[in-house]
Amino acid sequence: MIVWINGPFGSGKTTLAEELSKKISRSLIFDPEIIGSLIQRIPFWSSKDFQDIPLWRTLVVVTLSSLQRFYPGTILVPMTLIESNNIHGILNNLSKCDQNLIHVFLDLEESTLRQRITDQKLFPKEDDRDQQVRSWRLNQVDRGLAARAKMPANTIFLNSGNQSPEALSEAVLEAYKNHLAANRSR
């Protein structure tokens, strides 16, 4: 099964994935940003955002489909998808490859999100880089929150602003168990 954890930058995707990995045996956290970092090294691509590159979407789907085929557990994917072509292109293609896909979107109030981003230290030993990433994330808040309206109909929406990572993980686990039970009865 693949559990895609979506939401604005700073909404708690990685924290939720880490919490879920403690509770789901044989789970693997996969970050598609690794593929983006690789693609950005190819001089042909001029975009600063690897999600704008069609090859990234293709490689994410191929990689996750292959992992699902060969890895005997659950793959947790904490990754923000904001643009419609990424959201629908990736999630629809993953659904075609494997019906065991759960898509979660972490939502929260703008003020809470901005405060989290401001307080977070991503690169404690690199002040300039930390400030640059923080500034970029703050500039993405409106886009990230507006993405909620673009999510597919089967998306599970959870408020990460007023729930602990433990409570969020329990909600995802409930959907996970229901999904497994529904697939067993087919």
Image (spheres, helix red, strand yellow):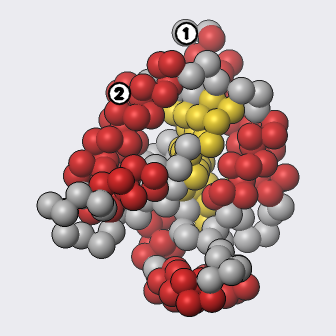
> What residue does disc 1 label?
186
**Callout 2: SS:** helix
The quarter holding residue 58 reads top left
- Dot 1, crowdedness within 10 Å: few (<14), some or many (≥20)? few
The answer to whether 53 appears left or right of 36 in the picture is: left
The answer to whether 44 appears left or right of 168 in the picture is: left
Q: What residue type is labelled 1?
A: Arg
- Dot 2, crowdedness within 10 Å: few (<14), some or many (≥20)? few
Q: Furthest-left residue in view?
A: 44
Image coordinates of residue 64 in percent, x first then y, are: 44, 34
The residue at the point 62 percent across, 71 percent down is 10
The residue at the point 68 percent across, 32 percent down is 27
Q: Can residue 56 be seen in this view?
A: yes
Q: What residue type is labelled 2?
A: Lys
The residue at the point 73 percent across, 85 percent down is 119
Image coordinates of residue 103 in percent, x first then y, are: 54, 44
Q: Can residue 171 be seen in this view?
A: no
Q: Is the residue 17 above or below the residue 143 in the image?
A: above
> What residue does disc 2 label?
96
